[in-house]
Image (spheres, rainbow, N blue to C red):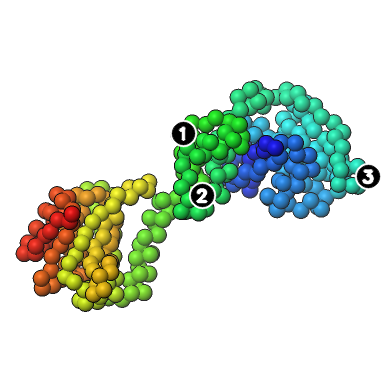
Amino acid sequence: MASLTVLLRHSGKWNDEGSYIDFSIEGILIKEYASFNDLVGSISNQLGIDLSTNTIKIPYNVEGNRTLMEIHNDMGYRVYALICISEDCDWRFKASSINKSKLFKVREFNDNHTCPLKDKVYEQRQASSSLISGIIRTKLTNHKRKYTPRDIIDDVKSDLGVDVSYMLAWRAKEKAMNFLRGEPADSYKKLPGYLYTMDKTYPGSHIRMEKSSKNEFMYVYISLYAFIRGFDHCRPIVVVDGSHLKSYYTGTFVSASTLDGAGHILPLAYGVIDSENDAAWTWFFEQFKIAYGVRENMCIVSDRNESIIKSVSRVYPDLPHCACI
């Protein structure tokens, strides 16, 4: 049996222009042939509304339209009405319980919309990125799961019977990810506090955050005290490399590692820079030299990145620099 999607916008307010703002969005799925009682029950469960109260009013509107509609239960009776908020619209749906049972009987139904709602929504059904993001959130809670925009397109077609573009599916995924994990900007704002906490928790560590001279990017460097002490008992080989980040702010994750006595990889330092350029790599090696100094027979191993080669020659002019294979 096919399902229908109901988009719930709640906990907001209506402004003077008739627009619903500052709201939260949730989506629920109901069966295609669900009763009106099922609809009211699903909405009340999702929003945590007590159906035993005397009056229930659930205002809502259809995506892409400003005309408000509402579901309400008046005077304590099991009588429910779905009406268009527009005073000039004749569309309405009323139902009431049969002899106080759980069965409902439709008392009145007029499916003729005399307001602009019909022209705006019924003629051209579309799924917005906000609607889709609310539906796919549960599929993104597991960060290990690979859920691509192409998968979203297939699921929306299967569940809603609507064709969406790749870009719309991509935007829906971004909104769902931001809802679950927060905006990238919020995470970056927490960096100063995070680094301060690390510095207090691991005294003696070398932790730095400095602004790039070319743009607004902040260089971040972390070398914990345990790493620094452990390097004295490891092989004097330092392997450095970088990996491009795919977040909104991009950047490059860089790291330095070595091998311990058992042949296991031991991280020595890591950080985030704007890109693999001369200034950034030079800054990284300068911080590494402050934290670790220079050991006897020490050498540096990396790929053939030109910025790494230049930076090593500047900061460690007397150390051998080897290329990995």
Residue 99: image tag: 3
Q: Please tell me which of labels 1 and 2 falls first in the chain.
A: 2
Q: Amino acid at mark 3?
A: Asn
- Amino acid type of disc 2? Leu
Q: Provide the residue designation for mark 2.
A: 140
Identify the residue shown where x is 52% and y is 35%. 153
Q: Nearer the viewer, residue 213 or 237?
A: 237
Q: Is residue 76 above or below residue 18?
A: below
In the rendered image, residue 70, in percent from the top left (x then y), is placed at 73, 38
What secondary structure is marked by label 3?
loop
Q: Quadrant of residue 89?
A: top right
Q: Is residue 243 left or right of residue 194?
A: left
Which of the marked residues, 2 or 3, is nearer the chain's N terminus?
3
Q: Is residue 142 left or right of residue 66?
A: left
Most foreground residue, 26 or 59: 26
Instruction: Report which residue position mark 1 lands on.
Output: 166
